[in-house]
């Protein structure tokens, strides 16, 4: 009876079995959390397919994570082959969950240091500091995408892979107006919330590496779920048959 966790007249459940099931659930939820960190908003069906879980199993884990406030639901429009797009429920990590996966123990010291710099040397010094901080990162990223051609979208895809290797959990997608580079994790989000110069310096690096002007649409530091950068498509040069209407 020493190894029995629950005793009833008709059922005996060993403690070892209970512990094993609990550990297995924890490992699966860790995998769900890591996948959400990497991909951002993802549907239950997509999570289940990636992790090899049945719809019932993935819902069980997502319901538990919702109850623990580790994930939250958002609507995401999914285009279907027939009919108009329908909103689908997607899951994203909460800010607290992202913090647990990527703890920033030195945010307080970094913020205090930047406040001191701003107080004694002005906001221009913060911008200079931010540019200096991303310089080494830019060199590493430049080396990683050096074999990519000049197409901005292709360079964004290569940059996403390089940023992911640096811990930014990035992805690149093609959209009607060009492309989007999404970063699902920001190592300096808490500090950048007070000092946006860090985001500005990072955006300048992305622009230089991709080789075109880019626009930041959202940042984790400002409370968005993902850092999103828009990359405009290359303008198509006019052909000989193009009729000019200007005078």
Image (cartoon, rainbow, N blue to C red):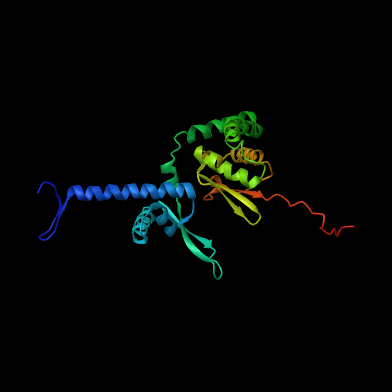
- Is residue 30 placed above or below 63 in the rendered structure? above
Query: Percent position (x, y) of residue 122?
Result: 65, 32
Nearest the viewer among 58 and 191 is 58
Judge left or right: residue 64 versus residue 4.
Answer: right
Left or right, 86 with respect to 24, comes to right
Eyeballing the image, is 147 above or below 176?
above
Query: In x, y percent, where is residue 1?
Result: 9, 49
The residue sitting at 63% across, 47% down in the picture is 153
The residue furthest top is 120
Q: Residue furthest right?
A: 247
Question: Is residue 2 shown to the viewer in this render?
Answer: yes
Residue 136 lies in quadrant: top right
Front residue of this view, candidates 35 and 149: 149
Side (left or right) of 36 relative to 154: left
Split into 4 quadrants, where in the image is the C terminus?
Answer: bottom right
Of residues 204 and 20, the one nearer the viewer is 20
Indicate the position of residue 215 as horizontal and vertical percent values. Answer: 65, 47
* Residue furthest to the front: 240
Q: Is residue 133 left or right of residue 234?
A: left
Q: Please give the count of numbered marks on the rendered protein.
A: 0
Judge whether residue 96 can be spotted in this image: no
State whether residue 113 is above or below residue 174: above
Relative to 246, residue 206 above or below: above
Query: Which of the pair 212/9 is nearer the observer?
Result: 212
Q: x, y percentage for residue 123? A: 64, 34
The residue positioned 22% from the left and 50% from the top of the image is: 18
């Amino acid at each position: 009876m020493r190894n029995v966790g629950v005793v009833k007249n008709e059922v005996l459940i060993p403690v070892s079995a209970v512990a094993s099931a609990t550990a297995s659930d924890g490992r699966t939820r860790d995998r769900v959390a890591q996948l959400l960190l990497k991909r951002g908003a993802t549907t239950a069906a997509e999570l289940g397919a990636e992790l090899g879980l049945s719809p019932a199993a993935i819902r069980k884990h997502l319901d538990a994570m919702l109850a623990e406030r580790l994930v939250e639901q958002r609507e995401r429009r999914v285009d279907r082959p027939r009919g108009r797009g329908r909103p689908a429920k997607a899951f994203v990590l909460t800010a607290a969950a992202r913090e647990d996966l990527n703890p920033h123990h030195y945010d307080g010291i970094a913020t205090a240091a930047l406040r001191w710099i701003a107080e004694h040397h002005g906001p221009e010094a913060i911008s200079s500091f931010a540019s200096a901080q991303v310089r080494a990162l830019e060199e590493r990223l430049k080396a990683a995408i050096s074999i990519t051609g000049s197409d901005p979208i292709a360079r964004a895809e290569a940059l996403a892979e390089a940023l992911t290797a640096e811990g930014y959990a990035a992805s690149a997608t093609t959209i009607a107006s060009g492309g989007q580079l999404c970063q699902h994790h920001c190592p300096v989000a808490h500090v950048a919330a007070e000092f946006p110069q860090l985001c500005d310096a990072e955006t300048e690096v992305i622009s230089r590496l991709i080789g075109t002007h880019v626009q930041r649409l959202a940042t984790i530091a400002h409370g968005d779920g993902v850092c999103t950068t828009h990359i405009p498509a290359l303008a198509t040069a006019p052909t000989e048959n193009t009729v000019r209407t200007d005078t």
